Image (spheres, grey):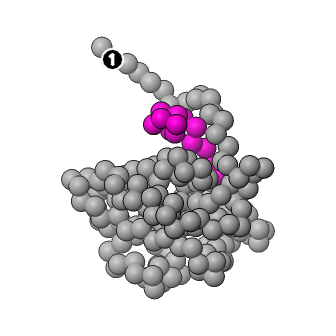
Amino acid sequence: MNAYELITTRRSTRRFQNRSVPEELLEQIIEAGRYAPSGGNSQTTHFFVITDPAVLNTLAETAQKVFAAMELKEGMYRSLASSIFQSKNGSYRFHYNAPVLIVLANQKDYGNNIADCACALENMMIMANALDLGSCWINQLKWLNEDPAVLELFRGFGLEENERIYGALALGYADSENGLPDRTPLPRKGNTVTRIG
């Protein structure tokens, strides 16, 4: 596929096979993220690549406990409300049981922290599509980036005092008949374009 096809056929995968991603493919995806643009070429994004099932389970349990303790409020962002609701029911696995979770952090007082992480996430999702792997952008840890339990867990992994989590990527082989992600382009109903000149 060419670059345009890789972009327009990238879809989020939310069901993954219990199958490891080969190291050479994982390395290509990480490098695609590391080569993303950053404000002033600062290159301050910190990539946490989690493949240990026990760590993934601990992280999922921690997130579920934190979300379950939150209160649902009127007008709350839909995805956040869904995370809280599912956690209260005990059925929540925010990373969709993917075999790989790549968590991105950056300096909390840096003005481009979210933008730099977003660029890296997009690069990794496009690269995953090129390699026939499914991926899904995960926001839940960003909502918990000041939670003491989440901070303590990631500090144990090397999160610096001045860093916070701004996004994550679930990654693996799609749980589909052929093991490939769904690549049917979704129609564009939003994202208004205004041409001037």
* Residue 120 located left or right of residue 102: left
Under circle 1, the secondary element is: loop
Q: Is residue 174 above or below residue 142?
A: above
- Is residue 29 among the parts visible in the rendering? yes
Question: Is residue 10 in the magenta section?
Answer: yes
Task: Identify the amino acid type marked 1.
Answer: Ile
Q: Position of residue 137 (x, y in %)?
A: 55, 54
**Taking the image as drawn, is residue 82 in sight?**
no
Where is residue 22? Give x, y as percent: 56, 65
Q: Residues within 10 Å of mark 1 (few under 14, many from 20)?
A: few
Q: Where are the magenta residues, as a range?
A: 1-15
- Residue sitting at x 68%, y 54%: 174
Q: Splitting the image into 4 quarters, where does residue 140 fall?
A: bottom right
Identify which residue is drawn at 69% across, 59% down: 16
Q: Residue 163 in magenta?
A: no
Farthest left residue in view? 40
Q: Main secondary structure of the magenta part?
A: loop
Q: Residue at x 39, y 59 (%)?
A: 31
Q: Mark 1 sits on what residue?
A: 196
Task: Please state the horizontal and vertical placement of residue 4, each as a whole percent of the image.
Answer: 47, 33
Q: Position of residue 134 (x, y in %)?
A: 61, 53
